[in-house]
């Protein structure tokens, strides 16, 4: 993981910050799948909460219920209840069931149902069985612990092959504070709210307004620059909870403390984004595209995203084929206005850097050296438009046989 | 192929209409690939020409040269020279080489270079060797024939597994007329000008203006509703040539004759679109999505395209898995404003019709019957938004292991 001055990576994920307990278990939502499928995350004190949601017009029932709760409490919350194996979406009684999940969690914790955030991920369009959740709730609440993050993150994984957690420690507003997060992937991920479920916790005291501002800014250059397969899920949610247990003077305006928080949030979310990309469904490689020399940030983002999103390029990366024409083709398809006449393209990895295109035309290169570079499992595509000073990065992965296999029969 | 009253399918492709000769041969642009790679199409008399091009900002050199020629002649043309195996794009001397191809063809035919339309398809970013084209030109011109369409269409194929040709005969302006076309696929195809190369010929006398109008309208509901993989090529072109040899009074305004031509053009292009979809790279199935009950045509098109373009749905179709939640998710991702609360979804094929979703929620169905329907090689997805009277169809295919294989190492 890349180092940032003043920020220290620490263990603990969503439990790294003071006062957050978590737990996860297998309540048996799908008898065939032996993995944790239900988790609970709770703060010792009431939190300010910021959240962003899927842009899909079909919104999962848990999203609707969470929005309602945060509206009712004015952006306050104490706990998250989340399940995998069933998205609780596009069925008859989704909202009712999502409300019931909140009530069950609230009863077990002795808090109000409106203080509970609910999330579900898994197959769309099936009825969510509430009985296994109800039966498991006492055990789930009993097992809460200040280092339960590993059990919790397991419970939100679907086709993920690795758990995704990051936490950092830094100083803000004169106090040592932490931000930690967990995320799940790994398909149906696209630049419009490119994630499925992400929960982030911090012990910093910060207003919901400042947190929402930071979240919106950071999402636009992290999760929203991630594409696995071009689909946007119905259940996507990123939620940040701040419980103020670091006992700093509350961050209520822009300035040094806000910037320190924003940077911490960026480090957590950028690392989760890279993990999501690298563990994209069926992925064998992380593909990172940085567009520099852009006339404005939107253009840089559009170009980087377009390259990462091209299925043909993704296949070429899987085949370790330096088919840079596809990169240029994807650059040309970016939804932005700019000139393509001066574009330079390099391919890079830990094995080296290879110029493949200068001023929009191919340059001679060694295919052997290209293979050396592309056989690594983290590939950088460097694009310089040479018409400005802005730059942005987007993250994706290759398109493999396994992606097709995993998604050919996901429901069974 | 679906029948349309008053239109008769005939053989002959681009040579079906009176006065069009064609030929194709292997001039050896890529020694490793033993297939025709160069074709010539010529009309006995000067044609009015209409064309639409790729929307990619990176435009192939042949596109730039063709545009220049059609501008210089005021939309007149006599011949098409086209090659596969090399896109003549993003290299140092592409325009020069494209001009040279036109000159060589013009010399062989005794016409002016500006009367020649040029097109290339294949790998991007490599220098086009002109020598093999120059050496082959005399033989190519000598071999021109009124039934050379089969040889010609072979020469524009790249990863296509079948040749794509259609022609129809009908009555317009009191004369029996014909429209015929050939097209190549099969990857890098997306709703923004979803094709690579398409040449269409007719013996109807029609003004370039009326032809351009019909082409634009028909493209928007045929090629632009086709998605194989979400990429848009640098070299896409559809070109229609009308030589007037049916000797009808020229069609110069909207009315019955224009409508007859437009319908004929629709039949040719719709059938080519279906063929392109069915022969999408690695495809094992044609997937057709019709969105009805839409408040307007744009919404119907956006919904149908969004469904066809979803990689997750494409994988589910490959796996013959009735995962209709992914259909609803794709409907929700469509770039249009509409309500998703009332949507109905059916899956259909020659084996039957299966309702899977009513009013936005799943309905119980037999998985066995679903398998029966999805095992066919032409699948229809029927979506009813129930909020209007407009409908549109989009065409695509499944996403398979072979797509990944074909594109993992396309250059070698």
Image (cartoon, coloured by chain):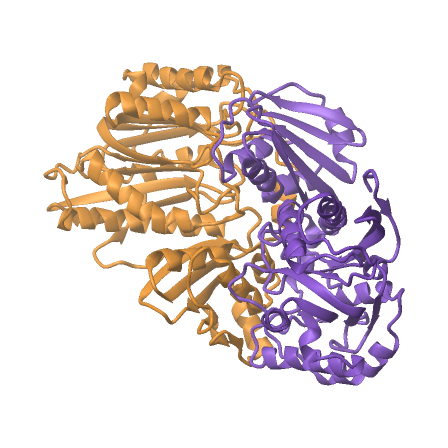
Chain colours: A orange, B purple
Position in image of residue B129 (x %, y %): 69, 82
Does the rendering let one see residue A371? yes
Residue situated furthest front in the rendering: B249
Q: Quadrant of residue A392?
A: bottom left
Position in image of residue B48 (x %, y %): 70, 63
Q: Image point 40% across, 63% down: which residue?
A: A291
Whether A154 is drawn above or below A44: the answer is: below
How many callouts does the rendering have?
A: 0
Whether A311 is drawn above or below A173: the answer is: below
Q: Image point 84% across, 63% down: which residue?
A: B149
Position in image of residue B394 (x %, y %): 65, 41
In the visual, does B263 lie left or right of A407? Answer: right
Q: Quadrant of residue A318?
A: bottom right
Does the rendering let one see residue A377? no
**Observer-nearest residue: B49 or B312?**
B49
In the visual, does B120 lie left or right of A359? Answer: right
Position in image of residue A37 (x %, y %): 48, 29
Whether A44 is drawn above or below A271: the answer is: above
Q: Image point 69% across, 48% down: which residue?
A: B400
In the visual, does B7 lie left or right of A92? Answer: right
**Observer-nearest residue: B316 or A32?**
B316
Whether B273 is drawn above or below B294: the answer is: below
| Quadrant (top left, top right, bottom left, bottom right) of the N terminus of chain A | bottom left
Q: Image point 71% across, 52% down: which residue?
A: B280
| Quadrant (top left, top right, bottom left, bottom right) of the C terminus of chain A | top right
């Amino acid at each position: 993981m890349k180092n940032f001055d003043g920020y220290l990576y620490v263990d603990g994920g969503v439990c790294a910050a003071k006062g957050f307990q978590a737990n996860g278990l297998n309540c048996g939502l799908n008898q065939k799948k032996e993995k944790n499928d239900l988790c609970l995350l709770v703060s010792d004190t009431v939190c300010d909460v910021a959240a962003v949601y899927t842009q899909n017009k079909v919104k999962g029932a848990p999203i609707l219920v969470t929005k309602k709760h945060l509206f009712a409490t004015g952006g306050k919350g104490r706990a998250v209840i989340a399940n995998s194996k069933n998205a609780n979406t596009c069925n008859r009684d989704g909202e009712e069931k999502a409300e019931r999940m909140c009530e069950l969690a609230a009863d077990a914790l002795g808090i109000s149902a409106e203080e509970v955030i609910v999330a579900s991920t898994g197959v769309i369009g099936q009825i969510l069985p509430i009985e296994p959740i109800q039966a498991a709730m006492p055990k789930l609440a009993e097992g809460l612990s200040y280092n339960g993050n590993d059990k919790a993150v397991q419970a939100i994984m679907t086709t993920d092959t690795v758990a995704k957690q990051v936490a950092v420690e830094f100083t803000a507003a004169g106090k040592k504070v932490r931000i930690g997060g967990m995320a799940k992937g790994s398909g149906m991920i696209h630049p419009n709210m490119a994630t499925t479920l992400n929960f982030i916790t911090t012990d910093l005291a910060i207003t919901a307004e400042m947190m929402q501002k930071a979240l919106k800014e950071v999402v636009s250059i992290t999760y929203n620059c991630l594409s696995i397969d071009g689909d946007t899920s119905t259940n996507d949610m990123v939620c940040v909870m701040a419980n103020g247990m670091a006992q700093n003077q509350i961050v209520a305006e822009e300035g040094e403390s806000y910037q320190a928080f924003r940077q911490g949030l960026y480090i957590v979310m950028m690392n989760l984004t890279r993990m999501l990309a690298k563990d994209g469904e069926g992925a064998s490689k992380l593909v990172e595209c940085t567009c520099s020399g852009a006339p404005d940030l939107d253009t840089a983002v559009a170009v980087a995203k377009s390259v990462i999103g091209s299925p043909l390029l993704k296949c070429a990366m899987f085949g370790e084929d330096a088919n840079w024409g596809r990169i240029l083709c994807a650059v040309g398809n970016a939804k932005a206005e700019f000139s393509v006449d001066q574009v330079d393209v390099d391919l890079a990895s830990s094995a080296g850097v290879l110029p493949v295109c200068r001023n929009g035309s191919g340059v001679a290169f060694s295919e052997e050296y290209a293979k050396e570079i592309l056989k690594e499992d983290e590939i950088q595509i460097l694009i310089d438009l040479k018409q400005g000073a802005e730059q942005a990065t987007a993250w994706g992965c290759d398109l493999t046989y396994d992606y097709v296999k995993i998604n050919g029969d996901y429901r069974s």
